[in-house]
Amino acid sequence: ADRVKLQLTDAAGRIAWQAEQVVDTEAYLQLRVQDEPLQRLGAGVYVLQVELGGTTLARQVVKAGR
């Protein structure tokens, strides 16, 4: 099993949220976000960085208001 690391940074580059989870590399990766601090983040533009097995992917994401 590998570990996947997730991190959200805000427009100023500050870490707004981060998590780490063990994943089974033989199965597809499915993440359901139920983390309360993440759900409480304000609306805005963030950068989501995902690291798994030495590979890192970063994408801009938008959290809409409620």
Image (cartoon, grey):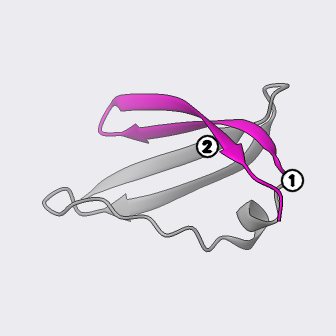
Q: Residue at (66%, 70%) from the top-left corner?
A: 35
Q: Using residue 3 as the reference point, say whether residue 41 is left or right of it.
A: right
Answer few, some or many: residues within 10 Å of disc 1's Cα (few below 14, many 20 plus, some between 14 and 19).
few
Q: Residue at (49%, 70%) from the top-left corner?
A: 32
50 within the magenta span: yes
Return the residue found at the far left. Answer: 26
Under mark 2, the amino acid is Gln
Q: Nearer the viewer, residue 3 or 63?
A: 63
58 versus 6 height, above or below:
above
Which range is magenta? Answer: 43-66
Q: Using residue 43 as the reference point, say whether residue 46 is left or right of it.
A: left
Q: Nearer the viewer, mark 2 or mark 1?
A: 1
Q: Residue 66 lies in what quarter of the image?
A: bottom right
Return the residue at label 1: 42
Q: Residue at (31%, 61%) from the top-left corner?
A: 23
Instruction: Tell me residue 17's x, y (percent).
Output: 72, 50
Q: Nearer the viewer, residue 45 or 18?
A: 45
SS at badge 1: loop
Report how far apart the C-alphas of labels 2 and 1 lie in the structure.
16 Å
Under mark 1, the amino acid is Gly
Return the residue at label 2: 7
- The quarter of the picture where the N terminus appears is bottom left
Instruction: Tell me residue 2's x, y (percent).
Output: 29, 53
Q: Nearer the viewer, residue 19 or 38?
A: 38
SS at badge 2: strand
For marks 2 and 1 on the same chain, the one whose residue lies earlier in the sequence? 2
